[in-house]
Image (cartoon, grey):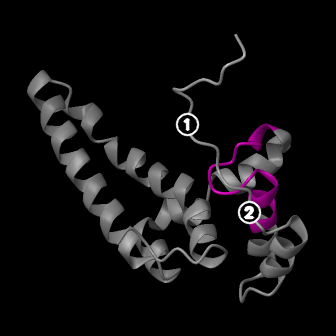
């Protein structure tokens, strides 16, 4: 009855990086004070996957969960932040999804609803921007390829 679950995912290795060393790494980054604050909140939430997101207040969750400039500017915001690979990939994926879903909605007779699909694409950029920038600046992730 106490045998381990053989279908459980493998346990991750514990990182050598402590909270103090992560905090000092964030402090030494060449970004603004507001970005450092967002990065510390993402660290508090448990990193990019945010397993401890519920430990944050609703205001803190909103700060790291939505980026208004990324919503308004989309791929241009990503380009300005130096994340051009993700800008191209997300733009291509969103454009393809909008085209396919828009054609399907036109076929069904809901063409007016298809006009709102651009807001969904903008929302994808807005909710991913802070995490993607954190990955680039703190973790050194350069993109998908």
Q: Choose top left, top right, bottom left or bottom right for residue 43.
A: bottom right
Q: Nearer the viewer, residue 125 or 107?
A: 125
Q: Is residue 120 left or right of residue 106?
A: right
Q: Secondary structure at mark 1?
A: loop
On residue 125, the disc is none
Q: Earlier in the sequence, mark 1 or mark 2?
A: 1
The quadrant of the image that shows the N terminus is top right
For label 2, count other residues whose C-alpha is less than 10 Å away and answer few (under 14), some (14-19) or many (20+).
few
Q: Choose top left, top right, bottom left or bottom right for residue 33.
A: bottom right
Q: Is residue 61 above or below residue 92?
A: above
Q: Residue at x 34, y 72 (%)?
A: 145
Residue lying furthest left: 107
In x, y percent, where is residue 23?
85, 73
Q: Is residue 87 above or below residue 123?
A: below
Q: Secondary structure at mark 2?
A: loop
Q: Nearer the viewer, residue 105 or 115?
A: 105
Q: Is residue 22 left or right of residue 100?
A: right
In x, y percent, where is residue 115?
28, 42
Q: Residue at x 81, y 65 (%)?
A: 40
**Marker count (numbered):** 2
Q: Is residue 96 above or below residue 17?
A: above
The residue labelled by disc 2 is 15
The residue labelled by disc 1 is 9
The answer for how far apart the CA atoms under marks 1 and 2 are is 18 Å
In x, y percent, where is residue 50?
68, 48
Question: Is residue 47 located in the magenta-colored stretch of the structure?
Answer: yes
The range drawn in magenta is 39-54
Question: Is residue 8 located in the magenta-colored stretch of the structure?
Answer: no
Q: Nearer the viewer, residue 119 or 64?
A: 64
Q: Residue at x 63, y 73 (%)?
A: 139
Q: Residue at x 55, y 52 (%)?
A: 127
């Amino acid at each position: 009855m106490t045998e381990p679950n053989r279908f459980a995912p493998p346990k991750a290795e514990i990182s050598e990086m402590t909270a103090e060393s992560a905090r000092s790494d964030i402090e030494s980054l060449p970004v603004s004070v507001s970005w450092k604050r967002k990065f510390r909140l993402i660290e508090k939430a448990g990193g990019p996957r945010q397993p401890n997101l519920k430990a944050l207040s609703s205001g803190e969750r909103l700060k790291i969960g939505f980026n208004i400039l990324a919503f308004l500017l989309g791929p241009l915001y990503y380009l300005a932040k130096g994340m051009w690979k993700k800008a191209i990939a997300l733009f291509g994926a969103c454009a393809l999804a909008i085209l396919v879903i828009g054609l399907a909605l036109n076929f069904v007779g809901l063409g007016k609803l298809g006009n709102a699909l651009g807001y969904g694409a903008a929302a994808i950029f807005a909710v991913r921007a802070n995490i993607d920038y954190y990955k680039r600046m703190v973790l050194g992730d350069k993109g998908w390829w």
